[in-house]
Image: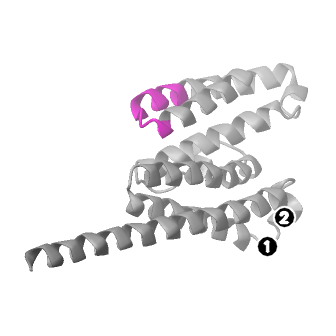
Amino acid sequence: MRKATRLSKQAILLIHHEKIKEAKKLLKETNELFATLPELTEKHPELFYSGIVDAAFQEYTEARVLLCIVEEKQLVEPEDLNIPSIDYVLGLADVIGELRRRALDMLRKDNVKKAEKCLEMMEEIFGELMSMDDAYMLVPGLRRKCDIARHVIETTRGEVTIEARRAQLEQSIKNLTKIITKK
């Protein structure tokens, strides 16, 4: 499961570097590791509840959901990943941080539109997490992750807004310069 966690983390880094094919390969390998889990836990059921399996599932969820977002596909469901719902929800909450990183990368590349799309997706995921009224009681750690996500979203919104306004100002200056040089 440590290897599955490591592979998922590496896949996330590859996704950020736009190396989608390599990321998919690592996620496929991770999925193959998960396929061995039922056999292992049959002999040693305590392993399944040790926490390391949950961490691997959450990291894998985070990587798969981020990949779907980057490829502009519909979000993947927990049943499609064969992941327990609690681990899916916690992994989904972590995607918000990865989307912030992607939004900042897009701003660095002067792509305000893609940064705005990342912000929209962050808000959509956060809205879904907040709409699960009883989830805070049932999912340990979700409240803390949502509090962090709220802060991350607010900070990202500010940075995207500033950059969007800066780009508009820059365009206005260019337009004014064209008008002045024509006269």
User: How far, Cα to Cα, is label 1 from label 2?
Assistant: 7 Å
Q: Secondary structure at mark 2?
A: helix
Report the amino acid beneath label 1: Asp
Quadrant placement of the C terminus: bottom left
Which residue is tagged 2? 136
Q: Which residues are magenta?
A: 15-28
Q: Is residue 143 visible?
A: yes
Residue picked out by circle 1: 133
Q: Amino acid at mark 2?
A: Tyr
- How would you classify the magenta stretch by its main secondary structure? helix
For label 1, the SS is loop
Where is residue 15 shown, x and y percent of the image?
48, 38
Q: Residue at x 37, y 73 (%)?
A: 169
Residue 152 position, x and y percent, is 68, 60
Scheme by which the image is coloured: one colour
Report the quarter where the N terminus lies: top right
- Above-or-below relation of 164 to 94: below
